């Protein structure tokens, strides 16, 4: 494909991504994957270039752009090499029109940028939310040790006890060490959220919102497979991905439990009041993960945020019923908004005067309310709020 044709293809894909964001339909990654599958004439270099153009254009636009072309024009304002490619050539974009407008830039739609600023995420802290994320690994201590594991590419130890950092795009999924379950792809912030649980061999630990089990596997390793680890979620599809991952990682003390929304305690009745620790990796707006999902900021609205904060409050109250007296509740969101973090946790403690906050014992982050906050700018991790109560 010519460079102009790649730009035009990226514009058309952006049109599809914008429409899907408005309709809360397929995510950008899926739209790209479908297009690549159906257009085999695009070679691997074309695919890489188109993907980079699409994601750079998404990052460049704060609010949802009107069209893919307006988004690309916004990107062209910061990348001079794109301007001559609007040349009207075969398969390329039409030449620039007189007074044609580029989409609006910025970190996020205005309402959301304001909410972030209210949580002290502004200026460089806000801009760093859209940088390219590194590729972090967790060495699975059930199968390997960071100090002795040899990998095909240079990896730098991170502040997480078993963490390694690689260049973004390193094809780790093709490595034998990945297939053998010696390494997992996991952001350092996520690894530290698991560390905050302080899971010990022999304990009963509940990973209440386990999803596909990213954190469950880290907890199983911390427990050295000893004790009970319950991984629950309301999403059958996500939870079903856990078993093969656990097998690959040799995590053998995990039991999965499918929950009904609002009736979570029914399925977990057998362990109510018995857990040494409950991790709530709550569903959230994901404002801390825009480095990986920049288009998520086009999908969020006030109503969705309200829905999420209500679920978070509910799950915190569920956890309070699962934990045994003196047990630990660890609340985690990959959001930097206080309504999902510090304020949510304060409200929980006010509803449960028998519980007290404990500062999470992790090597990165800064205090935020009664918890700790990690940010891409300050900590080089995804954005997280992590708080513990006992
Ligand atoms: C942030 S994701 C979890 C990611 C996962 N812990 C990991 O590390 O891969 C939040 C999860 O909460 C789940 N969830 C939503 N509502 C829930 C509920 N009422 N009870 C339990 N899980 C719920 C979602 O299905 C989603 O998988």
Image (spheres, grey):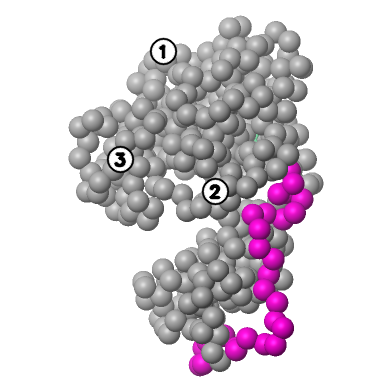
x, y (%) of residue 128?
54, 48
**Whether residue 342 is situated above or below residue 248 in the rendered picture:** above
> What residue is disc 2 on?
128
Gap between marks 2 and 1 measured at Cα: 40 Å
Q: Say if mark 1 contacts mark 3, CB within 8 Å.
A: no
State the mark number for residue 156: 3
Query: Which residue is drawn at the image coordinates 62% and 47% (left, top)?
Result: 123
Closer-to-camera residue (195/231): 195
Task: For residue 270, say whether it is visible.
Answer: no
Disc 3/disc 2 C-alpha distance (Å): 21 Å
Asked whether residue 113 is drawn in magenta, I would say yes
Alpha carbon separation for disc pair 1 and 3: 32 Å
The residue singled out by tag 1 in the image is 202
**Would you say the magenta stretch is mainly helix, strand or loop?**
loop
Which secondary structure lies at badge 3?
Answer: strand
Task: Say what secondary structure mark 2 lies in.
Answer: helix
Asked if the beta carbon under badge 1 is closer than 8 A to the nearest atom of ligand 1, the reply is no
Q: Earlier in the sequence, mark 3 or mark 2?
A: 2
Position in image of residue 12 (x %, y %) = 59, 77
- Residue 19, horizontal then vertical, whole percent: 68, 68
Q: Is residue 385 above or below residue 318?
A: below
For the point 55% across and 85% down, the residue is 86
Which image quadrant shows ligand 1? top right
**Chain-order first, disc 1 or disc 3:** 3
């Amino acid at each position: 494909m010519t460079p102009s044709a790649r730009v035009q293809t990226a514009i058309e894909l952006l049109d599809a991504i914008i429409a899907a964001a408005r309709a809360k339909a397929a995510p950008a990654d899926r739209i790209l994957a479908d297009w690549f599958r159906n257009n085999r004439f695009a070679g691997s270099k074309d695919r890489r270039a188109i993907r980079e153009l699409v994601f750079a254009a998404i990052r460049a636009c704060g609010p949802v752009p009107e069209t893919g072309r307006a988004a690309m024009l916004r990107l062209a304002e910061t990348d001079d090499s794109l301007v001559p490619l609007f040349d009207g050539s075969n398969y390329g974009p039409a030449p620039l029109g007189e007074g044609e407008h580029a989409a609006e830039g910025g970190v996020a739609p205005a309402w959301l940028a304001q909410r972030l600023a209210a949580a002290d995420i502004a200026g460089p802290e806000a801009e760093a939310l859209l940088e390219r994320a590194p590729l972090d690994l967790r060495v699975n201590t059930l199968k390997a040790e960071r100090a002795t594991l040899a990998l095909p590419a240079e990896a730098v130890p991170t502040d997480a006890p078993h963490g390694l950092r690689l260049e973004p795009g390193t094809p780790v999924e093709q490595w034998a060490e990945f297939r053998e379950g010696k390494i997992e792809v996991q952001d350092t912030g996520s690894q530290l959220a698991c560390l905050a649980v302080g899971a010990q061999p022999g304990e009963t630990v509940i990973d209440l919102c386990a999803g596909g089990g990213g954190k469950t596997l880290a907890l199983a390793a911390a427990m050295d497979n000893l004790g009970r680890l319950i991984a629950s979620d309301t999403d059958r599809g996500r939870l079903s991905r856990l078993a093969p991952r656990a097998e690959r990682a040799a995590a053998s003390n995990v039991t999965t439990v499918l929950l009904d929304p609002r009736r979570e305690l029914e399925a977990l009745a057998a362990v109510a009041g018995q857990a040494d620790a409950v991790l709530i990796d709550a569903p959230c707006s994901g404002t801390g993960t825009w480095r990986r999902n920049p288009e998520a900021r086009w999908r969020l609205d006030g109503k969705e945020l309200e829905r999420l904060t209500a679920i978070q409050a509910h799950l915190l109250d569920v956890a309070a019923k699962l934990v045994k007296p003196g047990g630990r509740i660890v609340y985690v969101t990959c959001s930097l908004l206080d309504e999902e973090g510090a304020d949510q946790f304060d409200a929980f403690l006010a509803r449960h005067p028998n519980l007290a906050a404990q500062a999470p014992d992790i090597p990165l982050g800064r205090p935020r309310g009664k918890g700790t906050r990690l940010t891409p700018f300050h900590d080089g991790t995804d954005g997280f709020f992590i708080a513990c109560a006992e």
